[in-house]
Amino acid sequence: MSVSHRNSRLRVATYNTHKCRGMDGRIRPSRVAEVLQELETDVIALQEVASLSGGRREQHQAQYLADAVGFRYYLGETCKWRGATYGNVVLSRYPVRNIEVYDLTASRRQRRGCIRCDLEISPHKIIHLFNIHLGTGYLERRKQARLLMSKDVLLSPELKHPRLVLGDFNEWTQGLVSRMLKHEFQSVDIQFHLNRRRTYPGVLPLMHLDHMYFDPQLVLQEFILHRSRTALMASDHLPLMAEFHLTPHPEKPA
């Protein structure tokens, strides 16, 4: 592989860790760490991460999981859970040039959010990565769709580089979120890549909640549902991993 091609390659995963609570009901960050090591990715978008400062090492899940793969972590807090910072986390081997955290709360049930990290995958090559966790309510997600597709978030004029939007969208039908994102972005046809239409829960899939959307400058090379023995036990979700090649592109107009 040439140096220029390698510098334009991105291996990324999305994974809802369920607070590192496995299918046996036990909170075991070490199992999630093992899964992340199996993935061999450059960037990992995690949802439902609880990080408690001042406790045992594994109780600060963001730091513990980042250490396990040798990455830095970037935390987008949505709320507190049992005294811990709770929300979305991005783990990255690449430098992150800018971070934004967006409040996507649209109901009284639970706060929801998104963290954006501007990844510099090679000199002057930036990708705007959005790690998202949406609500479980139908009307809640309709409101969140409009929040996302606004000039405050995904349509912001300050976004000059390719966008990659991924996470747990909690949408298993073609709702407003899916329709609006597919109108703006390319998406992954999981039937074509995985020969299946359902990925959640991992042990006995009934629906598809985790998604990736991306600008056309990101060319999908590979898409995998990671189903190792450890992954099937570590969380109710399974990681989705994609490899992209970043093509040369002009800057997006303001």
Image (cartoon, rainbow, N blue to C red):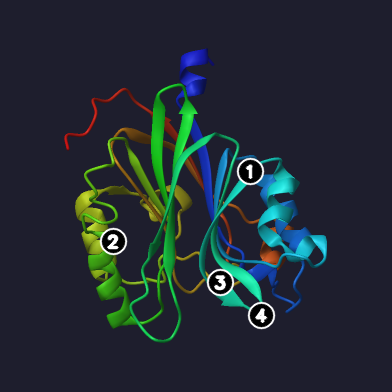
Report the quarter where the N terminus lies: top right
Looking at the rendered structure, the kind of residue marked 1 is Arg
Q: Considering the numbered disc 2 on the image, is that residue within a helix, a strand or a loop?
A: helix
Q: Is residue 44 in sight in this rendering? A: yes
Looking at the rendered structure, the kind of residue marked 3 is Pro
Q: CA distance from mark 2 to mark 4?
A: 28 Å
**Residue 147 figure quarter:** bottom left
The residue labelled by disc 4 is 82
Dot 3 or dot 2: first in sequence order is 2
Q: Residues within 10 Å of mark 2 (few under 14, many from 20)?
A: many
Q: Residues within 10 Å of mark 3 (few under 14, many from 20)?
A: some
> Which mark, by number, is residue 201?
3
Dot 2 or dot 4: first in sequence order is 4
> Which mark, by number, is residue 72?
1
Q: Considering the numbered disc 4 on the image, is that residue within a helix, a strand or a loop?
A: loop
Relative vertical location of residue 5 with respect to residue 19 in this rendering, above or below: above
Label 4 vs label 3, nearer the camera: 4
The residue labelled by disc 2 is 148
Label 1 vs label 3, nearer the camera: 1
User: Who's the residue at 43% across and 86% down the image?
Assistant: 109
Image location of residue 225, percent across then percent down: 55, 53
Q: Residues within 10 Å of mark 4 (few under 14, many from 20)?
A: few
User: Who's the residue at 37% across and 74% down the image?
Assistant: 105
Q: CA distance from mark 2 to mark 1?
A: 26 Å
Q: Considering the numbered disc 1 on the image, is that residue within a helix, a strand or a loop?
A: strand
Dot 4 or dot 1: first in sequence order is 1
Q: Residues within 10 Å of mark 1 (few under 14, many from 20)?
A: some
Q: CA distance from mark 4 to mark 3?
A: 25 Å
